[in-house]
Amino acid sequence: MADFTVSQAKAERLQLQKAVWSARLTRLLWWLAVLVVIVGSLLSLMPIYWMITGSFKVQHDAIAYPPELFPTHPTLKNWERLLAGMPTLRWLLNSFIAASGVALLGVITSTLAGYAFGKKRFPGQNLLFWLLLLTMMLPKQISLIPLFIMMRDLKWFDTYFALIIPYAAYPFGIFLVKQFMQGIPNDLLDAAKIDGASEFGVFWHVVLPLTKPAVGALAIFAFMFGWNDYIWQLVVTNKQTMLTLPVGVSKLVAGWATIDIGVGMAGATLAFIPMLVIFLLFQDYFVKGITVGAVKG
Amino acid sequence: MRGKWVWIIPVIGAALLALSLFIAACAPATPQIVEVTKEVVVEKEVVKTVVVEKEVPVLVTPTPEVKKPVKIDLWVDPRFDPQNVKGHPELKTALDYEKMVANDYIKDNPHVSVEIQVLDWADLPKKVPVAIAGGVPPDILRDYLGRTSTYAYEGVTVNLEEVIPKEELEDFLPGLLELYTINGHLHGLPIFYWVQNMIVNAAPFEKAGLLDMLPLDDHDWTFDEFYAAAKAIKEAKVGVEYPLVMQVASEQGDYAVHAFIWGAGSNTWRDDCQGLDLDNPQALAAMEFLNKLYKEGLINPDVTTAGWQDVNNLFYAGKGVFMGGGMSTVNVSIPQAQKEGKVTAPMDARMTLYPHLGDKPAGLPVGPTGLVMFQKTGRSDYELQEITKFLIHLSSEKWQRDYCISSGQFPTRYSVGAPLAGDPNYELTLEWVKKYGVVSMGLNCPHYYEVRTAMPAFFQAMFLGKATPQEAIDGMMKASKDIFGK
Amino acid sequence: MTVSAAYPERRRTWWQKIWEARAAYLFILPAYIPFIVFVLYPLLNGLRLSFYEAGVNKAKWRFIGFDNFVRLFTRDDVFIIALKNTFLFVLIVVPVVVVISIFLAVIVYPLPRAAQSFVRMSFYMPVVSGGVVLAMVWIWIFNRDFGLLNYLLEAVGFYQLLGIPKIGWLAQTETALLSLAMVVISWSIGQPLILFLAALGNISEELYDAAKIDGASGWQIFWKITLPLLQPTTLFVLVTTTINVFQVFVVVLLMTLGGPANATQTIVYRIYENAFVFYKYGYGAAMGVVLLIIVGSIAYFQFKLLGQEVEY
């Protein structure tokens, strides 16, 4: 310090001050950004809040102007009407089986295929991959009838097969896993191969643990996909006992000349809760950097 | 590497497309028959409330007197809200009502079992066509004529004239049977119908001392009289903001808007059903009249986005006083809304006719619902007969009377008589229909839905000031011609 | 490999390549068999109807060559409008979704785990709660007279400042598409956010440490390290969001029905109406073919621009 001239010290101090201010500014901006994020999250949650409180509102309050932010006359009538005398629990179970099946199959086939597409080279790779992509680009309505006829010929109406098997291949999931796999350093794979691991061993012991965050996301997406596929479930189920929850609730509400908003909201809430549970369960998969260190060490 | 390969995709795609085309061209034209009906008969897990003990012996040891079991698939619209069904407080859902009607037949015909599905209005147009195209339609469908006529044009319905005895058909109103006759086939059996007119809330008029501006005695009024009444009640400042409430956001309930076109003396559809018929000064006058009402604030400003629920709410809140509706609106919907506390303004709902431009009111729109039987491969003559008998049961005098009372609609059989006789609104409607006749909404015309859904956009454009009334009409006419390929 | 020895040299290496990659094919097989049977075949089968006049009655299906396509572009004004609207929709929504979700991910990632979970959940919930509920809430928000949006805008003096009357957001042709775009954005962020957060979790801490030692600023780290390493995920999000937004129709169905005056018609809403209201499967399939060609070529260019291998 003593060696510095006065001007040097001054310049240094100035620079330091500048750095402090720019750091403060950055910090301020960052906190501002965090604030924006928090407000955004709360806004995003509003429809959910609306749905849940709506299920406890009597019809009169549900359509009040200006809207009630909180049910002033909470009622259980909507829930009673929804659950009474209808196999609602059976529908819930059906939906759960269908969505879990779709998620399970989707995760298995997608991780296997995604690995091959992301980390391997083979003739026809790009063609096979683009075929997958192309099928994602069209709305369901195009293939609905041919697929329906196939179900008829397989005699799969009113079975879980119809709700699950057509989704065994999940192009979106394959694409997702492929993109994630591309981020895994090749050195890790090569090292494992040098250690004498089999093809499947590399996949199972090296690649899969590294893709856990993507697999968690994939499971959630696939589950939701299997849960919400309304039109397909509507056309392949006929028996009262094989309906899924969304389809069942819509048939239940059918026939009420005045659509009770509260009952609709109760139905939506009921369909929403299982997905919330699944989401919270798979949250654990998103934990940062899980095994990267372990493999390296 | 990646870039070099990708060109092959469109080539292979095209090749696959060509291949599938080739396969399709070679495939047999008729779908393979799956013996669905026969199969399910064996599998006895069917929705029904017949005493089970009776059923089992029938299956295991068929005796000569016992008829062969028949299973019937019945899909219905969600017409009957159990809350409105009179005299059956035990019913909880729409399905319960339909089961009751079916069981009334099954108790005398235990060899018949019926699997019923009540489909939401939004689900009906999704599930039914897919099932037809997939070769597994229901045996009987109950739906609105506007939709079943499409199935008839596709030639997938049974010609009921060939299966239902002539004496039975003679009991039905011939005009309605004619509506249901498409390409020479009687494609469905009408079981009830609604008639639409205008509903007016007389309470604000009374409050403002303007009651004599409404045609409450002869229900006959002109565009000018209607305009004067609308303007007066708005200016009276008794809470009425937009005297005429309606919507052109969707095609639903479009007759409430088209009523002005009919009132002006124009058709909406051509007599030969081959498209719209709006290219005339009368239709233009109607459009200009509506446009004037909107520009002067006499129609609700959200007319281009509102749903029917919103329109009803405006009416219930006393902000609007004129609305499209019919007997069931006054007799069923409004009392129900009052019960639920939705009506927040003084309400004195009366029926009246839409105003007219010429010397007399236009005819009234009529919307029938009917039972349709679909063709099904592998159906035996015996089964056809049994299904027909059940269909006749569903349309029978006894149940029609019940339908009409429960949903405020009109019977299609002479023998039903007047289930609501004595009800002033019922008598009034009948009197109007007798006096002024009915108008065609195009329900039984080809491409009905396509033309119908193309129309709201032009009403919207006019109200939003993006098109003049003439341009709106030209747009609708062009759309109609494009759809019909002319 | 005794069989392949009989083939000429060039052919043999081709087979050899395939044989060497046999493991890869085995990995693909479990997905590809159901894919061909339940996805690809029905889709091609559906698309072939674009050359047919095809309604609900299979017996009446009739081959008509390119007539459906001719009708699409010569006498279907609404389809042309829908085409234009769809492009506009994609141009508005896709960039906004990608930028917002990267922004959110980067801001949220350093926060404590609980906060991270909360934000991730809140942005994903609109996806979970489904279209009907969202539509009801948004219709209310956009209402001209008692909607939340106009309430807020009035509170901050927006209308007073511009001196214009209150806007009915869904009722006017100028604002309807924009309003729907906002709804779609609100429920399109959740999925990319999850993916970006997961991708950030996969970036090695050592890279950041090294950069910090070299004296890189936060911005430099973001541009030079974070963004390039997120590239595979960004490509995925970009492509899937583009595909999804091209298929937008639920908001249209629930909120505007294509109105007012066709201002919110989209391609897939046209396909939906043709399939489920008019029962014109052939005509709807022709629209599907047009959609496929458009989205396919756009996705192809996205891959070209962003799809270089990321190796490190």
Image: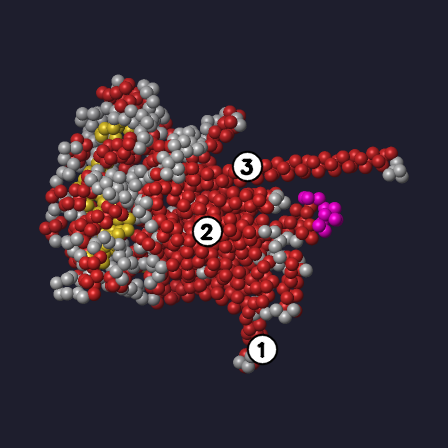
Label 3, label 1: how far apart the Cα atoms are: 66 Å
Closer to the camera, A288 or B391?
A: A288
* B21 relative position to C87: left or right: left
Q: Residue furthest left?
A: B167
**Which amino acid, mark 2?**
Met
Mark 1 lies on residue: C9
Question: Disc count in the image?
Answer: 3
Q: Are marks 1 and 2 in contact (CB under 8 Å)?
A: no
**Quarter of the image holding residue A9?**
top right
Instruction: Report the residue at 38% width, 48% height from top.
Output: A246
Secondary structure found at label 3: helix
Please identify the quadrant where the N terminus of chain B is shown.
bottom right
Marks 3 and 2, how far apart at CA: 26 Å
Which amino acid, by three-letter code, is at mark 1? Glu
Residue B78 rendering spot, x and y as whole percentages: 28, 45
- Residue in the image at 72% along x and 35% along y: A21
* The image quarter in which residue B373 lies: bottom left
